[in-house]
Image: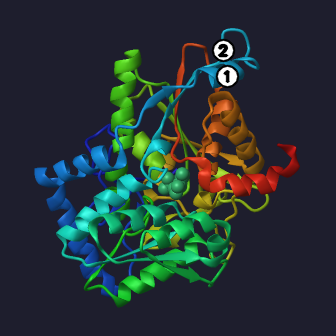
Amino acid sequence: MTATTITAAPNSFRTQPDERGHFGQFGGRYVAETLMPLILELEREYNRAKADPAFTEQFNDLLEHYVGRPSPLYYAERLTDELRKSAPEGHGAQVWFKRDELNHTGAHKINNCVGQILLAMRMGKTRIIAETGAGQHGVATATVCARFGLPCVIYMGQTDVVRQQPNVFRMKLLGAEVVPVTSGAATLKDAMNEALRDWVAHVDDTFYIIGTAAGPHPYPELVRDFQSVIGKEARAQMLSRTGRLPDVLVAAIGGGSNAIGLFHPFLDDPGVKMLGVEAAGHGLDKEHAASLAGGAPGVLHGNKTYLLQDDDGQITEAHSISAGLDYPGIGPEHAWLRDVGRVDYTSATDKEALDAFQLLCRTEGIIPALEPSHAIAAVAKLAPTLPRDSIILANLCGRGDKDIFTVAEHLGAKI
Ligand SMILES: *Cc1c(COP(=O)(O)O)cnc(C)c1O
């Protein structure tokens, strides 16, 4: 366990990072010198925006009328009953979902993109760049760029371009330029490197919309704040529907933005446990994407956090059936919350995610994305161990339309 310096009120886990962007030993801003003035300008502008009621009003208005918020809070009755079949007497928690898969563009990514493009326009930036893995962040970025009439360049690993064709086509329809990246394993990490390179070359007019709660300070903080709408809504909805808070929150983790968005508003509720679910791929002893379970602290993409790396500190390739979880790092606030013991982290394999995917399709008539299928896999293990009157709330952070071809490939004739 690591020593931590936190700037929050004593006994609070709802921290702001310190002035250099650290959550304990994690986070910070390890960027090229050319980017430093821009990062500082972004931090100043974000602080001004946070204090400006007009910014909040515009953000909330777009979330309501363009994104379709608030998303429903849903009691998954048939899934609950199904999981109770294998539970000991008196056990089998209620399973509830926050339905962020119903957002415009099909995932939680749009919440953050709306916030960041409003910031970009406040800063007078006229060109938007982003990286994408599964393509969900690319689609969400291309969407807000079309909405506000800004040119958009999306960096995407060539491997992902091939396995996420429908999203590539969507981005192009929305007017974005998609640049395939062939370096490294040609996945998300490489796309992020390329986007950072573009940013260094175009600091004057370009805003980089980062898609998860990682990267140099202030990105982890501002992405978290924009995604916290998930947890704020869920907390109020749960209180009004059941008169109480959930016992456990569960969310899938790629870089950690949907998870921190759900968790953050509950961090100071001592009765609420939290479980982040990393992608265990083929297994934790084989190829996987579980940076907390199988990584060590290091620096990548502007922040210090847990990273998958070899003995020489070379970043190793992540693997997950889900392109959105296929990242060798994790947001620094999660690294800190793990080390201080506030949030528990586990993992689910490709196979477990595929099983959970089918379970949700058949019990609830909801086709989830493969990312939240990892969270559902963890829920399926956890629910039978908890008393019947306990409540699990999981984030259904994306819908599965984009994944049906991947799933078909794996299940083939078995369906
Ligand atoms: C991108 C994505 C993720 C992973 O990103 P986080 O920042 O960890 O939330 C998870 N689920 C879906 C549906 C995604 O599109």
Residue 393, compared with residue 20, is above or below; it is above
Q: Residue furthest bottom?
A: 201
Q: Secondary structure at mark 1?
A: helix
Instruction: State the image coordinates of residue 382 (x, y, percent, origin top left).
Output: 65, 29
Image quadrant holding the C terminus, namely: top right
Write down the quadrant of residue 182 in the picture: bottom right
Q: How many marks?
A: 2
Image position of 253 (left or right of 29) = right
The colour scheme of the drawn protein is rainbow
Q: Earlier in the sequence, mark 2 or mark 1?
A: 2
Instruction: State the image coordinates of residue 275 (x, y, percent, origin top left).
Output: 55, 39
Q: Is residue 327 visible?
A: no
Q: Secondary structure at mark 2?
A: loop
Q: CA distance from mark 2 to mark 1?
A: 6 Å
Q: Residues within 10 Å of mark 2 (few under 14, many from 20)?
A: some
The residue drawn where x is 71% and y is 22% is 82
The residue drawn where x is 65% and y is 59% is 289
Query: In front: 153, or 307?
Result: 153
The residue drawn where x is 44% and y is 30% is 73
The label number, if any, that marks residue 8 in the structure image: none
Write down the quadrant of residue 127 in the picture: bottom left
Q: Is residue 251 visible?
A: yes
Q: Which residue is denoted by mark 2 in the rendering?
A: 91
Image position of 121 (left or right of 243) = left
Q: Which residue is denoted by mark 1 in the rendering?
A: 385
Do the numbered discs 2 and 1 sit on residues whose CB atoms are within 8 Å? yes
Q: Is mark 1 within 8 Å of ligand 1?
A: no
Q: Residues within 10 Å of mark 1 (few under 14, many from 20)?
A: some
Instruction: State the image coordinates of residue 351 (x, y, percent, origin top left).
Output: 77, 47
Instruction: State the image coordinates of residue 273 (x, y, percent, origin top left).
Output: 50, 31
What is the three-letter code of the residue carrying label 1?
A: Thr
What is the three-letter code of the residue carrying label 2?
A: His
